[in-house]
Amino acid sequence: MPGYAQPILHYFLHLGFPLLIAYVFFKSHWKQAYLILLATMLVDLDHLLANPVFQADRCSINFHPLHTYYAMLGYVILLFWGKSYRIIGVGLLFHMLTDFIDCLFTFSRCGQCLQDSPIYEVLRWLL
């Protein structure tokens, strides 16, 4: 995959694909649903707790507090509450899936780059 394709796919999945999710699954109020799905991007504020804040080839999954398996369990629970919470849960889980896909691409390009990542063994098992 060319070097520019991974970030394009990553940001499309974060910003563009949620529009499709909103329109297909929340058709009667897709605009509001899309804004809520975009607002779930605020989960990335936990990146500010990392030192350094940005590190190329770092996998977010199970590294940042709001990207942990425990947090994801909470996002799954949101699916079973009211409609607004369900949209938030969908957005957060799709955000985690997008970040996981990004980790897979990084690992396939540079496995040793993620050797110290908390998700390294999962990625190694999958690929």
Image (cartoon, grey):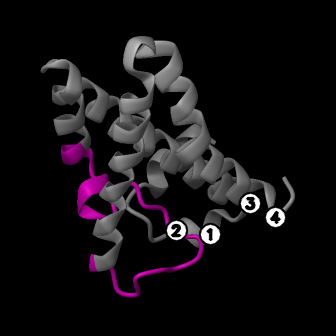
Q: Residue 3 shows which numbered tag?
A: 4
Question: How far is the residue under mark 4 from the one under mark 2?
Answer: 20 Å
Q: Which residues are magenta?
A: 49-71
Mark 1 residue type: Gln
Question: How far is the residue under mark 1 from the one under mark 2?
Answer: 5 Å
- Up the image or down, 41 lies above or below 90; here it is below
**What residue appears at the point 60 percent right and 71 percent down from the top-left corner?**
113
Q: Residue 109 shows which numbered tag?
A: 3
**What residue appears at the point 26 percent right and 40 percent down from the top-left corner?**
72
Return the residue at label 1: 112
Q: Is residue 72 left or right of residue 3?
A: left
Mark 4 residue type: Gly
Instruction: Provide the secondary structure element on which disc 2 rests.
Output: loop
Mark 3 residue type: Arg
Return the residue at label 2: 115
For marks 4 and 2 on the same chain, the one whose residue lies earlier in the sequence: 4
